[in-house]
Amino acid sequence: MDLLDIQTTLREFELERYNIHNLLIKVLRIAKYRLDVKEIIFMSLNKSSSLTNDKYLALYSEIKTIAIKKGLSSNEYKTIFVDVYENYYKNQRTTDWYELTSKSVEKGYVVGLSVSELTDYINQIEKVLETNTIPEGLHSLDLYYENEKKQKLDGIYLNHLGSCKSILNKIRDYLIDYLVNVESEMVINKELDDMDFKNELLILIQQGHEVKAKCSEVGLYGTLYISGADYIAWIEKCKLFIKKHVSDTEIQENFFNIAKGANESGETPFNSMIGILTALQDYDFTPTPVVHTDINKKIDKIFISHSSKDIEYVTALVDLLNNIGIKKSDKHIFCSSLTGYDIPYGENIYEFLKLELNNNNIMVLFVLSHNYYESAPSLNEMGAAWITSKEHNSVLTPNFDFKKITGAIDPTKISFYMNDKDGLNKFRDTIVKTFELDEIDYKIWDRDRKIFTDKVDAIAKTEALNLNTQVKLERVKKLNENKMELHLRFINITDKEIEFKFIDLELGDSSGNKLNMSVDEDLLDEFRLYPRENKIVKWTFDYGSSYNPRRDDSKLSKISFEIYS
């Protein structure tokens, strides 16, 4: 953490008024780095939602380890924690709040929402207020009652809106004041450091002249030579100083090149070295920040990492991105399963993917599903995106369990389900902000979002039937040299009757021989799996390959199928 980090964060606060959750996390990291216990307590309390007694005590214990590390006693820490909770956290959150259950204004009410929840609630209220309109064409009496109802609802939500914004403003001001104080402290320390460096320089220059006087000898032709252990030691001290404190590589190279042949040479190398040291008295010793081009470079392309089996979900998602404002072009979207957005003809697949993921201007969008985690290429993309530290977001298909997120993706990073309206709203805001797009009229967005969620729900309904239907190979029985009998267990955990479009089987024996076949369509036309039915069906198949039914290896068996929705 350096002065530039603090100043950058302060500039970010200028751009954000209420959506300050990410900035709070950033400032919290700064406070933890500095062991600023008071600020850690304040930000941790504001990051937490529904602060129950158990959460309060857990937070108290968690921060106590930091306080002890800083050298505070248990009593000192307790005093600070209580003071922050009562005089800062509660004081900033105490307001006159209209309580919906009691239908009255509760004075001295402490709003317990976290910073992120306050931001979300503000967005919800603003949408409610925007849509709370009086229908046209009402009778005068009906118009009167509708107007009364509208004003009452507006009054309630304006009360909540004002309170939430006031709380966030107070938290924001607290964080800014803290950063300004840290900045001032670091500026003073920097000035002191500069003074120390310049004093060290003056000492080196003075020592140089003393060493020259001590180590100089006149040659046969009256030429002055400087050499000796003290001269070499002085040169090495100068090199160490420059290497440690001077980030300008040109200055470093110049000094080091001169120093190489300085011993047992004349005055010229010595004078050059003294000249560089003298010039450094006006040098700014602030460390040059490392510029991360992959973060600072503007993102202008989305790489959709998905399983090809989820093509229907992905097609709908690309349509939604187009509606948000992402252009219909392979320059702005890469999706290997969709024509026009896929790998160009003639390109090597793996080399192309490698180049895409090495670009600094892409955002990776993971479409997580059961199929994704069964796809080796998808998992490879996930690992590559993680290694190259790409900006990424995760969207979950409706039937995928959030708890099953594994691998390189951080499950604590915000993800959302495809049919989650609030999640889609935040996703749209992220895309609009990241790609600097024009805002969409909310009515148009509501319509586009509904079309998308309707599509997703329809796809998910069919997928759920497949997920809730199981077909397992129980036994392979050889009947003769050409025929075998398969014992297949069918399980239907739904309340619906199931009909199969197809069932494909891949069998393998212990010698590595494989056999691929499909269930005859005539069998499937007559076959039904009734609600909550669990049964074994025996079907006879011909086989003629080198596969040996008696040596069937169940671990090598694969069954794929699809059912009618």
Image (cartoon, rainbow, N blue to C red):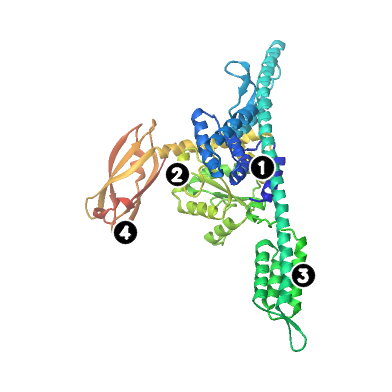
* Residue 228 location (% of width, % of height): 66, 78
328 above or below 50?
A: below
Using residue 362 as the reference point, say whether residue 53 is left or right of it: left
Using residue 190 as the reference point, say whether residue 525 is left or right of it: left
Identity, as a three-letter code, of the amino acid under mark 3: Gly
Q: Which image quarter: residue 315?
A: top right
Residue lying furthest left:
480
> As rendered, which of 277 and 301 lies closer to the eye?
277
Identity, as a three-letter code, of the amino acid under mark 4: Gly
* Point 51% across, 28% down: residue: 52
> As rendered, which of 183 and 22 lies closer to the eye?
183
- First in residue order: circle 1 vs circle 4: 1
* Residue 151 location (% of width, % of height): 69, 18
Q: Which image quarter: residue 472?
A: top left
For discs 3 and 2, the disc positioned in front in the rendered view? 3
Q: Which residue is mark 4?
A: 512
Mark 4 and mark 2: span between their CA atoms? 27 Å
Few, some or many residues within 10 Å of mark 2 (<14, 14–19, 20+)? some
Mark 4 and mark 3: span between their CA atoms? 78 Å
Identity, as a three-letter code, of the amino acid under mark 2: His
Q: Is residue 372 visible?
A: yes
Quick one: SS at disc 3? helix
Quick one: SS at disc 4? loop
- First in residue order: circle 3 vs circle 2: 3
Q: Which image quarter: residue 78?
A: top right
Q: Which residue is mark 2?
A: 370
Q: Which residue is mark 3?
A: 275
Mark 2 and mark 1: span between their CA atoms? 29 Å
* Point 71% across, 69% down: residue: 207
* Point 47% across, 49% down: residue: 407
